[in-house]
Image (spheres, rainbow, N blue to C red):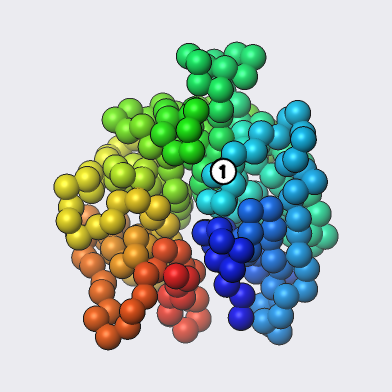
Amino acid sequence: TWSPQSSGYFGYGFAYDSKDNKIFVLTGKYNITVIDADTEKAIDNISLKGYIDNSIRYYYSPRISYADMVYDPANDYIYIAGGTRFVTVLNGYTDKVVDFINTTPPDLINGKWQNITHWTTEAIALDTQNSCLYIGAMFSNTSYFGIPRIVIYNISANEIKWLNISGSNWCFSSIVYDPDNNYIYAWLIFAGLVIINTTTNQITDFINFINNTNVDISFDQMIYVHDNGCLYIFDGSVVVFNTTTGNISYFYSPNIVFAAYSGVYDPYIKNIFTTD
């Protein structure tokens, strides 16, 4: 059994490599544990410390502990966001870092933007239809407060765009892609759900959870379940958002003391596994 919180950092980073049958799990500020999905045993430990410390091109901030990652089956790469202005590219077969994607926007001149010195990535999702990464990022001079944006990176064309987000000064904690409607769902902490149409790359809706007393709107993580078309938002309890009807429901377990802050769906047995 591996606990992503064993080192004192939130275990928000999960990725399943379907080609090599591996699970990549964030297990610390700098570390990723690789698990063989057949044997359920750890087979490798990847340290990003050497790529982060004292590096001119790699800015480290406390938010590395909220790292997110996504697997691309088209190239067998894992893309890792969190705490730096770069997205780390990991080869799923060799477990080695092979590249970095610089997400720095053009108006961040000489490392500064309106006296704000930090630009960091927060969360990441892959639009498999268009081969694009959607990366939650922000300008900031503190751990969580700043100016959020969505970075859109086209993997095939090696092109990058930035989508401005208004109405919030907080960071993204989770982004997921819905292949059924080609929408991106991005969670802004202490705010709500941003919905983006990947065809137009425009924001189509914002669902405000600020005044919703059923939801802890802080460090929420999300997964999309294709079988029922629902988005599951983990905020200690579980919020269920039906992407077709827009209905919102809540799951509580009165007989079990738990706080679910991240999860993964197993389509074979149709269960969701959560971490607390």
Give the residue at the far front of this rendering: 8
Q: Is residue 205 above or below residue 274?
A: above
Foreground residue among 71 and 192: 192
Q: Is 161 placed left or right of 202 in the picture?
A: right
Foreground residue among 196 and 23: 23
Q: Residue at x 61, y 81 (%)?
A: 1
Foreground residue among 222 and 266: 222
Q: Is residue 24 above or below residue 178?
A: below
Task: Assess disc 1: are there few (<14), some (14-19) or many (≥20) residues with their C-alpha within 10 Å of its C-alpha.
Answer: few
Q: Position of residue 148 (x, y in %)?
A: 43, 32
Q: Quadrant of residue 158?
A: top right
Q: Position of residue 45 (x, y in %)?
A: 76, 65
Q: Secondary structure at mark 1?
A: helix
Q: Is 16 placed left or right of 36 in the picture?
A: left
Q: Is 180 placed left or right of 57 in the picture?
A: left
Q: Quadrant of the C terminus?
A: bottom left
Q: Quadrant of residue 85?
A: top right
Q: Is 210 placed left or right of 101 in the picture?
A: left
List the residue tagged with mark 1.
62
Amino acid beneath label 1 = Pro
On the question of residue 239 being in view, the answer is: yes
- Label count reads 1
Q: Is residue 56 above or below residue 79?
A: above
Q: Residue at x 69, y 44 (%)?
A: 88
Q: Residue at x 22, y 45 (%)?
A: 210
Q: Position of residue 82 (x, y in %)?
A: 58, 45
Q: Residue at x 76, y 55 (%)?
A: 47
Q: Position of residue 97 (x, y in %)?
A: 78, 49
On the question of residue 195 being in view, the answer is: no
Q: Is residue 241 above or below residue 205?
A: below
